[in-house]
Image (cartoon, rainbow, N blue to C red):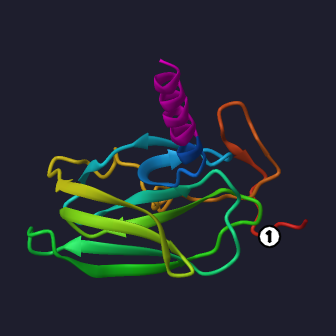
Amino acid sequence: MKQAISLIFFALLINASSSLYAQKLVACESYDSAGKASSVYSTWDIKPAGSYIYLHYSQPAALGSGAWTLLIERDSTSSGKYITYKKVTLKPRKGKNWIANDTYFPGKGKYKCTIRWNGQIKASTILTLEVKNDMDDEDADDTYYYEDSEMIFCKSVDKEGNTQGDATSFSL
């Protein structure tokens, strides 16, 4: 009985210590200023012309200095054989334990995404992207959300949102 309890305790200790070093690469819709990813999925609906998706990597300790790269490979044959689609050099912020990249995916298929540090694989994930033809560009949030926005400099704005005293220059 004592030996069984010791084995259970040992197994719990191993499980707890391995979760301390857990590194995760996920695809998400957004993340907060503390680096917590939200709306994480492994299967995505994208526009026919492609879509942007955040790839978010996190680990318990701060990211070290060195060469951080994101390798994205695409299954071109549906056989599980991946070819390189994109390789991105990442620059982590000092003291942060996470990094995110807003990545463009050009079309449907399976993508294998891998984070490397100094050539060593830290984490990877596989995404499945499906084209959703009825996706309305007006309803979809992406990197170009403010593309058709207009900025007006003025002295003030009234309660209805109308600008007062529009200006062509602005002094700081």
Side (left or right) of 34 relative to 156:
left
Q: Which residue is under mark 1? A: 169
Q: Is residue 80 above or below residue 15?
A: below
- The amino acid beneath tag 1 is Ser
Residue 148 place in picture, x, y as percent:
47, 60
Specify the principal SS of the magenta part: helix
Residue at 17% x, 54% y is 130
Q: Is residue 5 magenta?
A: yes
Q: Which of 127 and 165 is in front in this view?
A: 127
The crowding category of the residue bearing disc 1, from other C-alpha atoms within 10 Å (few below 14, some 14 to 19, many at least 20), is few
Q: Does the magenta stretch include residue 63?
A: no
Q: Which of 123 and 38 is in front in this view?
A: 123
Q: Which of 131 and 58 is in front in this view?
A: 58
Quarter of the C terminus within the rendering: bottom right
Residue 136 place in picture, x, y as percent:
25, 48
Residue at 51% x, 22% y is 5
Side (left or right) of 160 relative to 169:
left
Tell me where the magenta segment starts and ends, as one range.
Answer: 1-16
Q: Most extreme residue toward the right, as rendered? A: 172
Residue 152 place in picture, x, y as percent:
67, 58
Q: In this view, does 127 lie above or below 122?
A: above
Residue at 8% x, 70% y is 79
Q: Quadrant of residue 36?
A: top right
